[in-house]
Image (cartoon, rainbow, N blue to C red):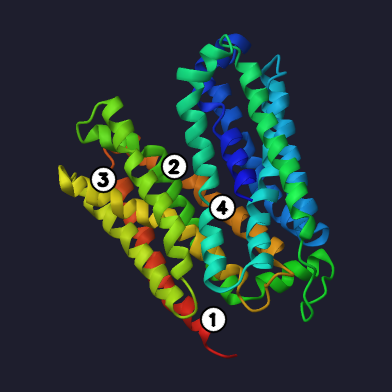
């Protein structure tokens, strides 16, 4: 699962370091390139729910294999692009494969693991896309492009082949897919599953929380370098400092979800949201020295585990379980990507209007406060017998 998600991150981030090579080669404007870079997210929002429904019918083995193969095809086709529309279509195709991986991963974990091991397993696989993205960003220009004689097409096709290898490996190791356990509800029509999922108040609240979590994570991830530059760091320094929350986030993902078991989950969840609020508030004060690293550390702790603990909670909501984990995951990522797109856009608009990040960081702090407050009703919904 980690390898599939790593290939997801690798192909997701593959275009960003190649913009300067692709634009003149295909005679693409900056505006057109922006549309291409965002094409897969637009498709993803609408494809996530159908992909989740498909997962619950095909099973995780076939569903994830299909997702990995679509991502591989997207990567290979990017390398054959001869004009703007070709590249746009190839990138948009990624938006069909991506949700099968994102929604399928929690389904796999719910089938194979129980208790604290379930949280640990989720923490392990969630580091995959980050590692893939970092690999693409760090190796593309300084290492791989010179080795490939600056052939960006061949590089994109190579990343697609990595996804193909990951898919074939998944097909091989998932032969022992657990059989559906007795007592699980038999799947009915797609509309019945959708109604059943949305009828659960806890699911509706988690979907709303997912928008806020993705808005915070994506806004901070996309704008942190620029935020640090407003504090006085140059571009190289800011890029290096921005690695701090990424590293801490990986450590957080590998440890904290495993602690989020039973009633303790809500304490862990609230603590993560508090870390997010405190990190944004500290950054609002334009910290220097050790306080800057404290703020970045808090942001890293929160970003590394917030989404994982929330997904873990979702798949264990009574009425979801293994039988509807794919559908619920589709709803989760469809809703969450609204925040994933809206968060960076909101921060950019506020930055453009004010010339600083005060309003944007205040918005992220308020979203964190909303998340902290949401833990109380969520706990009541899930722990109070109906």
Which label is found at residue 358? 3
Q: Nearer the viewer, mark 1 or mark 3?
A: 1
Neighbour tally class for label 3: few under 14, some 14-19, many 20 plus, Cα within 10 Å: some
Mark 1 or mark 3, which has the lower sequence index? 3
Classify the position of the C terminus by image quarter: bottom right
Looking at the image, do the residues carrying marks 3 and 2 touch, with CB atoms under 8 Å apart? Answer: no
Is 111 drawn above or below residue 280 in the view shown?
Answer: below
Which label is found at residue 382? 1
Q: Nearer the viewer, mark 4 or mark 3?
A: 4
Describe residue 121's horizontal placement relative to residue 355 as left or right. right
Secondary structure type for disc 3: helix
Mark 2 or mark 4, which has the lower sequence index? 4
According to the image, label 2 marks what residue?
A: 344
Identify the residue at horizontal 60%, vertical 54% (top origin).
333
Secondary structure type for disc 1: helix
What is the x, y in percent for residue 292?
21, 45
Identify the residue at horizontal 77%, vertical 48% (top origin).
172
Mark 4 or mark 1, which has the lower sequence index? 4
What is the x, y in percent for residue 110?
65, 67
Cα–Cα gap, marks 2 and 1: 32 Å
């Amino acid at each position: 699962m980690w390898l599939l998600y790593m290939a997801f991150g690798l192909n997701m981030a593959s275009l960003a370091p190649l913009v300067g090579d692709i634009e003149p080669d295909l005679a693409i404007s900056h505006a057109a390139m922006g549309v291409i870079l965002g094409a897969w997210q637009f498709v993803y929002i609408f494809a996530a729910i159908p992909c989740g429904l498909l997962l619950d019918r095909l099973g995780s083995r076939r569903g994830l294999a299909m997702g990995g193969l679509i991502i591989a095809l997207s990567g290979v086709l990017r390398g054959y692009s001869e004009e703007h529309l070709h590249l746009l279509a190839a990138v948009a195709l990624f938006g069909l494969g991506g949700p099968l991986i994102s929604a399928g991963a929690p389904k796999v974990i719910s089938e194979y693991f129980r208790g604290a091991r379930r949280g640990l397993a989720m923490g392990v696989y969630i580091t995959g896309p980050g590692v893939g993205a970092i690999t693409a960003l760090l190796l593309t220009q300084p290492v791989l492009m010179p080795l490939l004689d600056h052939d960006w097409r061949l590089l994109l096709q190579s990343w697609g082949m990595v996804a193909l290898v990951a898919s074939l490996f998944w097909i091989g190791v998932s032969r022992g897919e657990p059989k559906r356990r007795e007592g699980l509800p038999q799947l009915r029509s797609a509309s019945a599953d959708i109604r059943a999922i949305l009828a659960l108040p806890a699911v509706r609240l988690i979907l709303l929380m997912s928008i806020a979590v993705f808005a915070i994570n994506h806004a901070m991830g996309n704008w942190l370098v620029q935020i640090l530059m407003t504090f006085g760091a140059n571009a190289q320094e800011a890029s290096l400092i921005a690695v701090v929350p990424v590293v801490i986030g990986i450590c957080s993902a590998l440890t904290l979800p495993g602690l989020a078991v039973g009633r303790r989950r809500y304490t862990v969840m609230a603590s993560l949201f508090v870390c997010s609020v405190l990190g944004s508030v500290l950054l609002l004060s334009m910290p220097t020295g050790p306080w800057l690293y404290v703020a970045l550390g808090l942001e890293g702790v929160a970003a590394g585990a917030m989404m994982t603990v929330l997904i873990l909670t979702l798949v264990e909501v009574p009425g979801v379980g293994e039988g509807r984990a794919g559908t619920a995951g589709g709803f989760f990522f469809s809703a969450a990507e609204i925040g994933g797109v809206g968060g960076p856009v909101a921060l950019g608009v506020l930055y453009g209007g004010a010339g600083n990040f005060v309003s944007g960081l205040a918005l992220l702090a308020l979203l964190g406060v909303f998340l902290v407050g949401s833990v109380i009703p969520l706990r009541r919904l899930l722990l109070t017998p109906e």
